[in-house]
Image: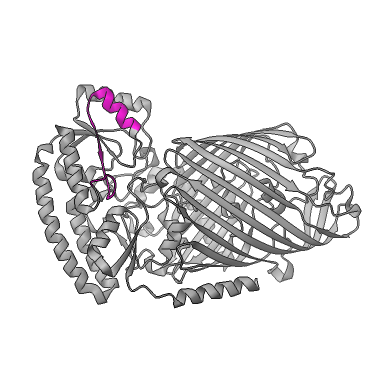
Amino acid sequence: MRRGYIKTAAALAAAALLGALSPAAAWAAGAGSPSNAFNPAIGLILSGTYASFSNDPNAYAIPGFALGEESGPGERGFSIGESELAIYANVDPDWYAMFTLSMHPDNTTSVENAYVQTTGLGHGMTLRAGRFFSGIGYLNEQHSHKWDFVDTALAYRALLGTQYGDDGVQVRWLAPTDLFTEVGAEWLRGDAFPGGGAANNGRGAWSTFVHFGGDVGISNSWRAGVSYLHTDAKDRQTDSSAGTDSFTGTSKLIIADFVWKWAPNGNPYTHNFKLQGEYLQRSDDGLFTPAGQGPASYSAKPSGWYLQGVYQFMPRWRIGLRHDQLKADDPGAAFAGTVLDPRGHTPKRDSAMIDFANSEFSRLRLQYNRDRSGLTTDNQWYVQYIMSLGAHGAHIF
Amino acid sequence: MKTLIKWLIAVSCLAALAPAGAAVQVFACEPTWGALAKTLGGEAVSVYTATNAYQDPHHIQARPSLIARLRRADLLVCDGAQLEIGWLPVLLRQAGNDKVQPGQPGNFAATDHVQLLDKPASVDRSQGDIHPAGNPHIQTDPRRIAKVAKALAERLGAIDPDHARQYAKRYRDFDARWQAAVARWTEQAAPLRGVKVVVHHKGWVYLLDWLGLKEVATLEPKPGVPPSASHLSEVLGQLRRQPARMVIRAAYQDPRPAQWLAEHAHIPVVVLPFTVGGTDGAKDLFGLFDDTIARLLKGAQ
């Protein structure tokens, strides 16, 4: 079923690419032609970066943390970022479906989102099935083109493999109150970091979250929440400078998140400010096998947090500051010298960015990171563009 | 997890026990439609208006408070024609409310019930933020509001049959007063026919169409693109050859570009309410046009 869906979506994706190459022709065909009047909305995100690092990004490591895939600062020099093709539409009066194909700079593709969701249940209930970014935390559900910085928070990188996306089902319920109160739960495959190996016969993870939100006067709005993610790993492999490490066990992650937005009179056009922060703590229990060594019992509680503020000081221009900090938990002498050894280091990072949005469909960004997540300070510079073609879905808060 | 489930059940029970308010819950996207729903619904409806006149209806954030409000709505009354495309779809998907989804009786788009102007022959984003279905800002023409009122009264009657007669009666009463007012406004505005104006955003085509004003330039180089210094000086140059009588902007728009042009071209800035609540005079639907006409006449003196 799912494979068939993806195959169809891939055909649509090819059609969309052809359409994107000759947008005028595509639009002309769309006008008054009944055969494609039901075509889903198609959007393409193109992004690219120029990056300069003082340290070798291939040797990137955070002492005390086994990192998931793609958990680094990126490539040096010119590279396109993830190009993202999104196709979405209502399926029928009761279902909505969304598909996002992510094309990576190394010419590989991955299915980022492929889910169906109910629209017709009512009573505040929404069910979702397929592949999606988990509703835990605040940043986790945001697609990378929506991030306020080029890279994600250090805590997400170290504790959640940048972003937790997995296959499974989700249920959300919105309370009938003026205060936004949403509770949700997910049952997932458990293939993504910090899980791995699709433990428990492909039902290796579950999560639950609650979010509250509201307005304070006309100019302020907020959202805050608490989330819990439980993953089981079965021979989860992670790479380190020494080789491949393996983990079999349980990770329990707690996230507390909040975001506060200010816009005078609720009109963000000229000035607006966004303050956002999250705290993540993971409890790992199980057997960890460092590269070239035997398995040893491992129990630790690594944690991290970030706080960032982004201010639009005139139409189209924004500046942002961010502080990231991690706390590795020393798992003991058995892991001395391995990837889990914190070496007495407190990983930190400070970032500053300025960006310019010519319209809501294009953005140019300059960012500097003073990255002390490794043992030596890395000065990281990024120049980035993010462009959105075609249909562009409305953004979540 | 257990505590969470207990808590969930508790909240559900509370919600079920709470008196199911007999009034039809209306979620209005813009103040004009909120005011219209109140006028037609009277005591039988409870209206929540999602935006105010100082907000740009194109650019609203999908705030949690709006999602929570839409959750309980029986009827969604919006402009439509993709005006709210940047935020309403998120509200609809997150609110878990089947009654107000597109295609349901509880989803009412005002622009579905009138003829739209400025429908682009072709659409491409190089033309700026244009709306493929046509210009959505119909609330600046009271003749079109009259048509929307008829359709909205019928819709209210359809989703709340118990009060259908009441809605029909309130509509007839409103329409009689409204038609008289439109005749009065049209007569008052007669001197404005043919007057040349500069507008900030292409948000006034229906007002201009109704009153016969002539738009000679816009401060935005393309719809939705902020006025730039170079474009403003182009407009100024154009005004030296072909003068206009006033610059029109809505209450929510950045005052500086209009102010700059007005000072250099020696013409007045006329700030119009654009929607209910945009000025002190525009307290309700009638005030909206009383004040709009008065401000235009003052600007044309």
Residue B151 visible, this angle: yes
**Is residue B261 inside the magenta stretch?**
yes
Between residues B204 and A254, which one lies in front from this camera angle? Answer: A254
Instruction: Give the residue drawn at x 38%, y 29%.
Output: B228
Q: Nearer the viewer, residue B290 or B189?
A: B290
Vertical comparison of A113 with B23: above or below: above
The residue under the point 48% across, 62% down is A179
Residue nearest the observer in this picture, A272 or A50: A272
Q: Say if the magenta span includes residue A379.
A: no
Q: Quarter of the image holding residue B42?
A: bottom left
Place of residue B124 in the rendered image (x, y in percent of width and height, measured from the top left) = 37, 42
| Quadrant hosting residue A145 | top right
Q: Nearer the viewer, residue B194 or A18?
A: B194
**Horizontal placement of A66 versus B274: left or right?**
right
Q: How is the image coloured?
A: one colour
Image spot of residue B77 (x, y percent): 32, 60
Image x and y of residue A13, in percent: 51, 53
Residue at (89% x, 59% y) in the render: A296
For the N terminus of chain B, give its image quadrant: bottom right
The C terminus of chain B, quarter of image:
top left
Magenta residues, as a range? B256-281
Q: How many marks?
A: 0
